[in-house]
Image: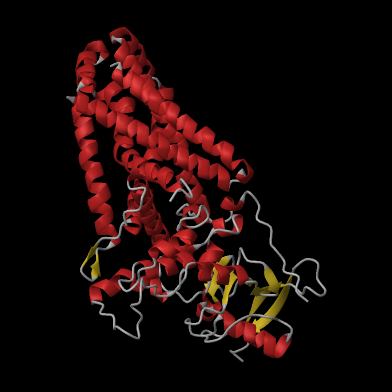
Amino acid sequence: MARSNEPFWWSLFSAGGVMAALFVPAFILATGIVVPFLAPDHGQAIYPQLHKAISWWPVRVVLFLVLFLSFFHCAHRIRHLLTMAGLEHARGLLSVACYGGALAGTVASLVILAGL
Amino acid sequence: MADDKKVTLSVFRYRPEQDGEPVFQEYQVPYHDDWVVLDALNWIKDNLDGTLAFRWSCRMGVCGSCGMMVDGVPRLTCATFLRDYYPSPIRVEPLANFPVERDLVITLDDFMDKLKSVKPWIIREGNNSPAVAEYLQTPTQLAQFKQYSMCINCMLCYAACPIVGLEPHFLGPAATALAMRYNLDSRDQGADQRQEALGDEHGAWGCTFIGECTEVCPKDVDPAAALQQAKVAGVKKWYRGVVLPRGGR
Amino acid sequence: MRKPYVRPMPWTWFLRTAAYRRFMIRELTSVFIAAYLVFLLVWLHRLGEGPEAFGKMLQATRTPWSVVLHVLALAAAVYHSVTWFNLTPQVMPVRIGEERLPHSAVAIAMGYLPWLVLSGLIIWGVLR
């Protein structure tokens, strides 16, 4: 049923909502509080451990999934938010801008995670 | 006498033959502990102003006729007690997001069309009509859709949903709950036929899960759940359509 | 005569009731989450660029500004998580025979519990 592609965007929104809900708060704590202030080695001694942990491929897969799906989750929500707040007439443009941005984020994630 | 307490009702008036714009008219109504807003409106009509127009019928919360905005909240006026507002004045307006015919009476033609658009009857493939065969349904099968069958079409959910106000074509909570009532009924085989209404960009997909529809429903139908479940079903259909384009069912 | 009156709906409709305002805040969390995700990408990029580059990033995350922004992002992310898990039971009702599992049970089993476990794993993994 290609009447509307809304189901596809909503499925990404839905999966992304779960990923963002489960993972993002802990990531924020990690980059904002734990790594800067609480990790046992202050200074650059923490670097090898972190780099090793993040290079482990299951971690990179999870990171990619969280980034990719959460970007599309946010894009979908922002698109609808702007539509409901009065930008109804720019619906098409909003979709392109929002999902385009999410795609850019996804590609960036792929490049950065692959290069770790 | 102890019985001369009064409460003020500030009522939305609109008379198409004489008003360009609506106005609010204030009425002083006797206050009784056990009166509801509908009682107050009927007292106004019987004693103060026979021209006030409003819909009502069963006065006991089953017909769905007396829905109005009471202090900005969609409510059945037969189930809204004066004592919960007294001594403050009470603002009574027609249900939000609908055009106003006159005073507290809204135009509900669009709503009726939306109900019809989901084909709210048992649809069977082939010749298995009820006259030939009886349906057997277990309590568990009934439980799948029973909640959605409790809707009294009172339209409070449409008044609560801002999407209804922003997008006139939005199918809306009650119509979607009605569609799901049939899609989830084990006797029904018509889900594909309801897809045109449900799967449209203004069908279930117009919903952003604000959730106010479920909040105001006087019958605990939970139309928000129906809308999300319609989306999930729509996603399954969509992916099946992509993977099996020649129509696996 | 019929001359139906259509009441106007201003674009500021979401300011009208507490429920609408809460809804808008919930939707706005996506802006904060998106912003954090971009930061996370930069953070990961620096991690891949070597100890000196990451050292500068580490310094940056020790500033008051970083803490404030992280706290704001955390508030938004947590609000997203809580509202998301609380709504999940309406998206996926769980039935056992005729009975439905109560909303709270579904929210805990499919949301709060995995959230706690995963978050614990992540923080432990970073602390190690």
Q: Nearer the viewer, residue A38 or C47?
A: C47
Residue found farthest to the left: C128
Q: Nearer the viewer, residue B136 or A9?
A: B136
Q: Quadrant of residue B126?
A: bottom left
Q: Residue furthest bottom?
A: B1
| Outermost top residue | C52
Of the pair B205 and C118, the residue shown nearer to us: B205
Considering depth in this image, is A26 or B129 the residue closer to the camera? B129
| Count of labels in the image | 0
Residue B132 in the image: state x and y as whole percent: 32, 84
Q: How is the image coloured?
A: secondary structure
Q: Visible in this render: residue C67?
A: no
Q: What residue do we see at 57% from left, 69% from top? A: B113
Q: Answer whether residue B79 is visible to the viewer in this image.
A: yes
Question: Which residue is located at x 56 percent, y 38 percent?
Answer: A94
**Position of residue B44 in the picture relative to residue B123 (left or right):** right
Q: Is residue B34 above or below residue C103?
A: below
Q: Split into 4 quadrants, where in the image is the C terminus of chain C?
A: top left
Question: x, y percentage for residue B131?
Answer: 35, 86
Q: Residue at x 31, y 29 (%)?
A: A64
Q: Residue A68, image x and y in percent?
A: 36, 32
